[in-house]
């Protein structure tokens, strides 16, 4: 629009012009990344995880069905499960010879947790832990996934969950996370929880009043002695 | 060692002390990468490609054997091949129903090239292209792998080969690479080859004398016209 058309356009109000902009913020870089201007051939980033994610989704060639307590069923591929988890390797290709079994029952695990674990096995990603709009849900998922990762020997997933829990220790989560850290041998996470709980008398009292603490008392009574020692040492 | 012990130690020669250092230069960062000092839980980088590489190596659950013209045999997994290549997807899970076939013959491809392609399918990596001690061999491998990637619809491998060839255009490689670029629809690479070949009369004459140029004449005669036009345009 030319400058002299502006006054007649109706867009000028009280001698001022309002411009509305829509900004699109890309949280991830697009898939195409130019490695070097010299080569001029753009190189897309690794797509192995995406391809395997599509294989899980499409279920082509799936040779095993997992049945959860809830009745939910998930189809998957034995070779990929075995490549990623020593537990599945032993189960499907070990001497126990469950190899021919087409259906495997999974007890004591929520369907959403098993689904997230399956997704991680195929893609090395756990988007459920990055739920920015519902951080408490993400922390609960991290607690469940930590236990699942430990059960199936998924070391990297376990470390990711430890990192997530480690940066989300508060009065509500501390006792439950401490119990988990104790049960699944996460020493760094355990120390961080102990430090937090014994940080101040107020924090300690608040944690003692949570449901998580009752669970801690029942499941890991020996940890209470450690807490006591650390708290006592701080007082002196 | 204390300062007053030094003169008697025998290490001082002509009043000077020589210190020998051994520097270890890590060409890659170690696998453990600390994401944030705040979490204190170190997070290892993605290990999906390593796990699948081990699956290829160990052949657990392999359900197809490829037989090359040379007689070399390679065992692999149909679901992973199909997840990565639309050609294998159609071959193993399409309507043509080769699904039940356990053995697939691969004609017109060197064993080393097929092996490198298989490795890339499982790991998204092509170390054969980074042979720093034998760059000409790496370029020849890139030429072969480009053709293989195009044949099996491995778009990312094709782009990696294009990038490699694109940064290795010289008198010896230009004509062969130009023929490849023409045959496999690599327009950026093709333009770079044409620019190089027509860059100077000396370069053009040197390229005309290579075996690669004879191959280009036989396989892609139409490209010669393009070369002629560009060279003519430059002269004017």
Image (cartoon, coloured by chain):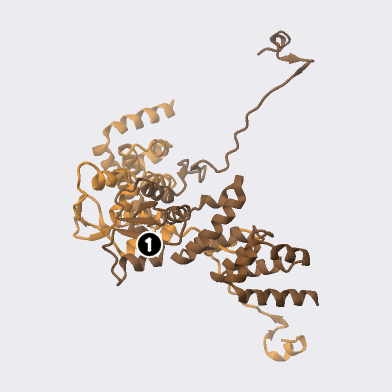
Chain colours: A brown, B orange
Quadrant containing the N terminus of chain A in the rendered view = top right
- The reply to whether residue A92 is in sight is yes
Count of labels shown?
1
User: Which quadrant would residue B189 be assigned to in this image?
Assistant: top left
B91 to the left or right of A119: left
A76 to the left or right of B132: left
Secondary structure under tag 1 reads: helix
User: Which quadrant would residue A222 be assigned to in this image?
Assistant: bottom right
User: Which quadrant would residue B95 be assigned to in this image?
Assistant: top left
Q: Position of residue B9 (x, y in %)?
A: 69, 90
Q: Is residue A151 above or below residue B68?
A: below
Chain of the residue under the numbered disc 1 shown in the image: A
A76 to the left or right of A41: left
Q: Residue at x 39, y 53 (%)?
A: A71
Q: Is residue A128 above or below residue B226?
A: below
Read off the residue under disc 1.
A83
Q: Is residue B60 above or below residue A227?
A: above
Q: Residue at x 57, y 66 (%)?
A: A180
Mark 1 crowd level (few <14, some 14–19, many ≥20, 10 Å Cα): many
- Residue farthest toward the top in the current orientation of the protein: A8
B68 to the left or right of A27: left
Q: Is residue A8 above or below residue A96?
A: above
Q: Residue at x 42, y 47 (%)?
A: A50
Q: Position of residue B43 (x, y in %)?
A: 56, 61
- Between residue A161 and residue B24, name the one nearer to us: A161
- Between residue A64 and residue B38, name the one nearer to us: A64
- Between residue A123 and residue B49, name the one nearer to us: A123
Q: Position of residue A202 (x, y in %)?
A: 77, 64
- The reply to whether residue B27 is in sight is no
């Amino acid at each position: 629009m030319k400058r002299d058309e502006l006054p007649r356009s109706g867009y000028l109000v009280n001698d001022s012009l309002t411009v509305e902009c829509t900004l699109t913020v890309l949280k991830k870089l697009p898939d195409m990344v130019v490695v070097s201007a010299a080569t001029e051939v753009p190189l897309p980033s690794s797509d192995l995880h995406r391809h395997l994610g599509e294989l899980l989704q499409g279920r082509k060639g799936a040779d095993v069905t997992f049945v959860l307590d809830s009745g939910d069923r998930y189809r998957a591929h034995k070779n990929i499960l075995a490549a990623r988890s020593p537990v599945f390797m032993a189960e499907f290709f070990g001497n126990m010879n469950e190899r021919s079994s087409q259906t495997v029952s999974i007890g004591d695990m929520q369907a959403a947790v098993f689904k997230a674990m399956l997704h991680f096995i195929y893609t090395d990603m756990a988007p459920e832990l990055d739920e920015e709009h519902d951080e408490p849900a993400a922390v609960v998922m991290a607690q469940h996934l930590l236990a699942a990762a430990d059960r199936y020997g998924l070391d990297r997933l376990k470390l990711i969950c430890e990192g997530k829990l480690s940066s989300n220790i508060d009065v509500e989560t501390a006792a439950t996370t401490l119990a988990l850290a104790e049960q699944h041998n996460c020493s760094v996470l355990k120390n961080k929880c102990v430090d937090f709980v014994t940080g101040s008398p107020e924090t300690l009292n608040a944690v003692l009043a949570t449901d998580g603490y009752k669970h801690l008392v029942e499941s890991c009574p020996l940890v209470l002695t450690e807490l006591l020692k650390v708290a006592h040492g701080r007082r002196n």
